[in-house]
Amino acid sequence: MNLHSWINAYLDHLRGERGLAKNTVQAYSLDLEALAAHLGEDRDPSTIRTSAIASLQASNVARGLSAKSSARQLSAIRGLFRFLVREGAIAEDPSLPIARPNAGWSSSTQRTEATVSCPSAKWRSELGDPQATRVHQAVARRAGPID
């Protein structure tokens, strides 16, 4: 069976055996259709590697998809691959090594916080301004690193 057929089997499983709501199954369907479009619907699931899933996540970032949407998509992908392992279609789950996107802050918020708040606060903290040091440390904790 190809990837498209397995996605349909998984969605049927979600509807029937797991009894998930129509909207939830529809959201999973859209997320998994994006995976199939990225990798090719006719692809054999046993040929999918971690790097292929990582490239989908990278393309999500490039398209401006939010961290929450990427995390939801990764959840759907992980569910599919758990199903494939359970059904014996693949030996191991290639989605396990993929880190969950940080859904706490969108990348645009991180950039805004770090770009606007950090430079002057960091500059002032390096000169010994204690208030600026506390602001810089708080922003750094909230925004995290920017790559």
Image (spheres, rainbow, N blue to C red):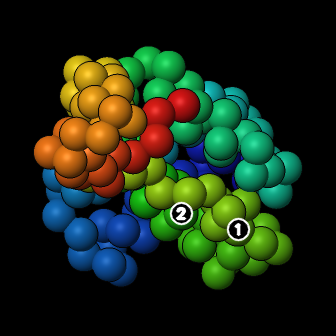
Q: Identity of the amino acid at label 2?
A: Arg
Cβ atoms at labels 1 and 2 below 8 Å apart: yes
Q: In this view, does 96 lie to the left or right of 48?
A: left
Name the residue nearer the viewer: 85 or 4.
Answer: 85
Number of numbered labels in the structure image: 2
Residue at x 60% of width, y 49% of height: 5
Residue 98 seen in the current view: yes
Q: Identity of the amino acid at label 1?
A: Asp
Reading the image, the residue beneath label 1 is: 93
Residue 43's quadrant in the figure?
top right
Reading the image, the residue beneath label 2 is: 78
N-terminal of the two: label 1 or label 2? Answer: 2
Name the residue nearer the viewer: 3 or 66.
Answer: 66
Q: In this view, does 1 lie to the left or right of 22?
A: right
Residue at x 66% of width, y 34% of height: 55
Image position, residue 64 (x, y; %): 38, 21
Q: In this view, does 35 lie above or below 14?
A: above
Q: In this view, does 53 lie above or below 113?
A: below
